[in-house]
Image (cartoon, coloured by chain):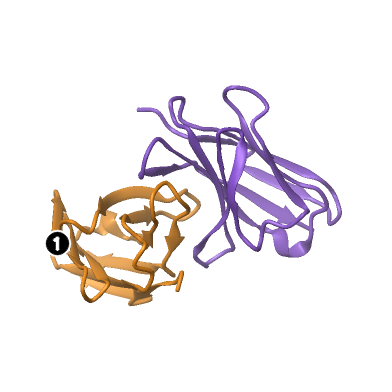
Amino acid sequence: QQQVKQSPQSLIVQKGGISIINCAYENTAFDYFPWYQQFPGKGPALLIAIRPDVSEKKEGRFTISFNKSAKQFSLHIMDSQPGDSATYFCAASGGFQKLVFGTGTRLLVSP
Amino acid sequence: EPEVTQTPSHQVTQMGQEVILRCVPISNHLYFYWYRQILGQKVEFLVSFYNNEISEKSEIFDDQFSVERPDGSNFTLKIRSTKLEDSAMYFCASSGGDEQYFGPGTRLTVT
């Protein structure tokens, strides 16, 4: 029940395209859903996060869509750029508690 | 912009030796965490720390592990007797609320 399932495992998108990564959770106590971006050899960097009281949050080219009834959330990267090539992790937590991470998606944006 | 710092960036140790990984969280944060990431895998929670005590720990965080906040700025993770399977990236994170900010990590190699 603590798992967060993430798909796809890897993704190749052409420059300018839309990258979509999906996550699903089971624990209804989760109330905070961040996405992290990680480059090789670096720590996860907080990208964008959402709470379940809204269905969508947009920051620049990054959008989170949240479906509370389905217990799913997704990251959309619009106008994907080669510099977006990284591993993306979804995560979930409940109130100042540990983050439970998904398994990660390795994104490659081809020039 | 405030950031979490970690030292050393890379630690090589022999099996059975003790290691101490150090972190300086963001100064006004009150919640501190250690996570680890085995190469190519997801980020896993180890322990959370609040108000000078452990608030939660995972199954990974057994008696060989301990954490300490020896002064007002440092947060340390000690592994008493390292095993080969402890080889991983260790990330410190801190938060003042929901958002957790990660340090650059310490790569621990146990030989």
Q: Is residue A59 left or right of residue B41?
A: left
Q: Is residue A10 left or right of residue A51?
A: right
User: Tag 1's secondary structure?
Assistant: loop
Residue drawn at (44%, 70%), measured in percent from left and top?
A: A103
The picture places residue B46, in percent across and down from the top left corner, at 59, 54
**Which color has been applied to chain A in this rendered view?**
orange
Residue drawn at (65%, 37%), measured in percent from left and top?
A: B76
Q: Residue B3's quadrant in the figure?
A: top left
Return the residue at label 1. Answer: A55
Who is closer to the viewer here, B104 or B33?
B33
The picture places residue B57, in percent across and down from the top left corner, at 61, 54
Residue drawn at (79%, 60%), measured in percent from left and top?
A: B83
Residue A86 appears in the figure: yes
Who is closer to the viewer here, A14 or B24?
B24
Q: Residue B109's quadrant in the figure?
A: bottom right
Residue A88 appears in the figure: no
Question: Any idea which chain is the purple one in this picture?
Answer: B
Residue extending farthest to the right is B16
Image quarter of the N terminus of chain A: bottom left
Task: Say few, some or many: other residues with alpha carbon within 10 Å of mark 1 (under 14 / 14 to 19 / 20 or more).
Answer: few
Q: Amino acid at mark 1?
A: Ser
Residue extending farthest to the top is B72
The picture places residue B74, in percent across and down from the top left corner, at 61, 29
Q: Chain of mark 1?
A: A
Q: Is residue B61 left or right of residue A46?
A: right
The picture places residue A21, in percent across and down from the top left corner, at 27, 70
Q: Residue B53's quadrant in the figure?
A: top right
Image quarter of the C terminus of chain A: bottom left
Number of callouts = 1
Above or below for A40 versus B101:
below
Q: Is residue A61 left or right of residue A12?
A: left
